[in-house]
Amino acid sequence: MRILGIDPGLRTTGFGVVDVHGADVSYVASGTISTQHLDTRALPERLKVLFDGISEVVQRYQPTCASIEIVFVNVNPQSTLLLGQARGALITALVTQNLPVAEYTALQMKQAVAGHGQAQKAQIQEMVKRLLALPGLPGPDAADALGLAITHAHAGKAMARLAAADGLGGVSKMGAKASYRAGRSR
């Protein structure tokens, strides 16, 4: 299984790709998609850059599934709305390429990678480096994305079995509706 993890952001979106063979998780690629070069008022153009960028990542690395961070309300409601639109563009890019999409909170990712939900960015970077035997620290956005991929590698199968048992369909290739329901049931 090849998993694409995505840390959504309107200015910088992190992505990370890992391969899973049994219990082994290995690094494939990671990086960021940036819209910082665009005028901050150019929301449609920024969303297109994100959509096209993640579509290119999918074409290049051919993941079998994806995981993306669930966004909660921040202090600034306007920022939350903009981030939600970025996340929507990214999810749309994934489902138009028929990828099942799992959703995890930052807390779930931090618990899976660092063992506690209060982990700081530097701790996530260090744990991702160790878990994937990387020669150096990944950038913070790429580390979060790799953390989401690692989270899905460890939790995805169990979550799919639980969702299937309660009739929600789990994380499957049944389409966006089934994946969305599985993400919301957690």
Image (tube, rainbow, N blue to C red):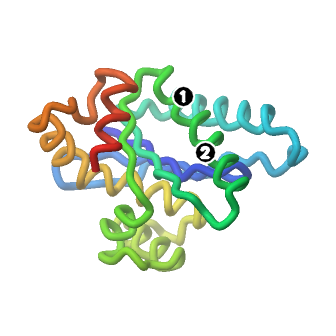
Dot 1, crowdedness within 10 Å: few (<14), some or many (≥20)? some
Secondary structure found at label 1: helix
Horizontally, residue 124 falls left or right of residue 140, namely left
Is 170 situated above or below 96?
Answer: below
The residue pinned by badge 2 equals 84
Point out residue 113 in the picture as x, y percentages from the top left corner: 34, 68
Residue 97, position as x, y percentages in the image: 47, 21
Distance CA(mark 2)–CA(mark 1): 12 Å
Residue 92: which numbered mark, if any? 1
Task: Please state which of residues 177 and 147 is positioned toward the viewer in this rendering.
Answer: 177
On screen, residue 164 versus residue 142, left or right, reads left
Give the structural element (helix, strand or loop) at label 2.
helix
User: Residue flagged by tag 2: what amino acid is it?
Assistant: Gly
Residue positioned 77% across, 38% down in the render: 46
Quarter of the image with the N terminus is top left
Nearer to the camera, 36 or 118: 118
Tell me whether circle 2 and circle 1 mark residues in contact (CB < 8 Å): no
